[in-house]
Image (spheres, coloured by chain):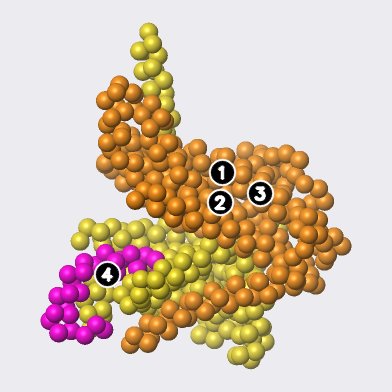
Chain colours: A orange, B yellow
Amino acid sequence: MFLLLRLCTVAIVVPVLVVVYFVFIGGLPAISWEFLTQGPRNGMLEGGIMPAIVGTVYLVAGTMVIAVPLGVLAAVYLSEYARRGPLVRLIRLAITNLAGVPSVVYGLFGLGLFVLLLNFGQSLLAGCCTLALLVLPMVITASEEALRTVPDGIRHTSLALGATRWQTVRRVVLPNALPGIITGVILSVGRCAGETAPILFTCAAFYMPHLPGGIHDQVMALPYHVYALATQVPGAPPRLKWGTALVLLAFVMAVNGVAIAWRARLRRRRR
Amino acid sequence: MRYTLRRATEFVIESIVRLSGVLAIIFVVAIFGFLVREAAPILRHVTLGEVLSGTRWLPTSTPPQFGMLPLILGSALVTLAAALIGVPLGVGCAIYIGELASPWLREVLKSTVEFLAAIPSVVLGLLGLLVLAPFLRELLDLPVGLTALTGAGMLAFMALPTIVSVSEDALNAVPDSFRRNSLALGATRWQTISRVVVPAARSGIVAATMLGIGRVVGETMTVLMVTGNAAVMPTKLSSLLRPVRTITATIAAEMGETPQYSDHYHALFLLGALLFATTFLVNLLGDLAVHRGQVR
């Protein structure tokens, strides 16, 4: 019986290695300075992916500008202001369910609300708003956990010195929770960089000859570029597909690696 | 004077914080409300019953037909197959990590599972398209490799991190005294696991299954890339080896090309609302199972 359990584990670990193997073997030959710094040429059959890399960076940055303040404030409410009760239970239920909404539904919502109703058009702005909704539950959950690790004694001391509630939160609690909040934010950067479905109809451009000039421009993005190369460009060399996938995977893994290393350092320092 | 000013600031800030707090509720309601609003116009032409039981999805022919049954069954088939593959594997792996592995191996395995969770779905889709599909086609001698089974395999793989980590949490929550008592009564290690630990963690494992299914139903890019996307009725078991088309893939593939506010546009929103309702229900059940586990 134990052998069976071991086999289950092997059946999970081996495919993970297979994924890494194929992406690296397929992608490494494509990686070059030109690949990373030039745009696609010749109907996407040659050239590089620089606009997609820049687009993904813009998207992630814009998303975080929207999601982080909202998410942190929501977490402050849950951990510092709210009293236990049906409202908090309802909020938590909403957060869980928001985290479970399929990404393509976020895409639909973003298209209907931001692109059409609010008339943002297919743009960086609409894409960032949509992605911000998607990562919001992650930011809230991580920030709340970080706020809860701040010892109550510090809060009481600050309040006893005559500080108001908000002064306590801003000058005492938040600075103490900041490293934990940053870990959560970095992890959501990784999530947001790899999402395709929400940007499919809100901002992703198949091909753009120039970089986006403002928040009302469409952008190219790495995950959409992988999808486009794989299914929309007949005859695209596999080298390019794997190469783009490798850059995306490396980006996401680097971001996650930073978050994990940062978290480990935090834990050590706390002890 | 300064005192009143400070109180005013405090009041304003507290209101802002409070508003951000309930934002999650507002968003969930807004998303569902919006999906329904955008879906409603399609029901002026056809009834909900017709749409749900219709067997032909031909949104661009004249007259268009919006029978969603093949898509619903497509999603159901892929999800069911993925659950059949993923749940036993995931729970088995969780038991191994939680009960048998040495501490360092446990850390390695947990990181591997976390790594898997972080891989973007479009990368896995590419892998399914270029590696798994040709492999299955050769292996099973099929005309095309892009089938329901290919999709189910990839989806099972993607649901594993959720299933493993939630099940493992549930196993961890079982008090050690249970294990020691069972062993002291002369039960073997396997008997302890199968008769004591796993039953005690049952509601957590149910939750893991539900949350894993929630992930599978909503997964889009991988399915779009590897299931072949033919909107045919999957009626027989052999449909597993044929292309199918799921709800998510239909939305993702067609929304970009449909005119705004056309019947087709509204029909796709109806699919979205259906999808939202399904995942909401599945996640709610999963969440309830988690909480029931905590109370006990």
Look at the image and tell me whether residue A197 can be seen: no
Of the residues shown, which amino acid type is indicated by label 1?
Answer: Met
Q: Chain of mark 3?
A: A
> Which residue is found at the position 27% from the left and 69% from the top?
B201
Q: Chain of mark 4?
A: B
Residue nearer the viewer, B14 or B31: B14
- Do callouts 2 and 4 point to residues on the same chain? no
Look at the image and tell me whether residue A117 can be seen: yes
> Which residue is found at the position 53% from the left and 50% from the top?
A186
Which of the 4 quarters of the picture holds residue A162? Answer: top left
- Alpha-carbon span between mark 3 and mark 1: 11 Å
| Labels 2, 4: front one | 2
Q: Which class describes the residues within 10 Å of circle 4: few (<14), some (14-19), or many (20+)?
A: some
Residue span colored magenta = B163-190
Q: Chain of mark 1?
A: A
- Alpha-carbon span between mark 2 and mark 1: 8 Å
Q: Which residue is mark 2?
A: A189
- Do callouts 2 and 3 point to residues on the same chain? yes
Q: Chain of mark 2?
A: A
Residue nearer the viewer, A117 or A164: A164
Q: Which residue is mark 3?
A: A57
Of the residues shown, which amino acid type is indicated by label 2?
Answer: Val
Q: Mark 2: which secondary structure?
A: helix
- Do callouts 2 and 1 point to residues on the same chain? yes
Is the residue A8 above or below the residue B267 in the image? below
Q: Which residue is mark 4?
A: B201
Upstream in sequence: badge 3 or badge 1? 3
Are the residues tagged 2 and 4 within 8 Å (C-beta)? no
Are the residues tagged 3 and 1 within 8 Å (C-beta)? no
Are the residues tagged 2 and 1 within 8 Å (C-beta)? yes
Is the residue B123 above or below the residue A156 in the image? below
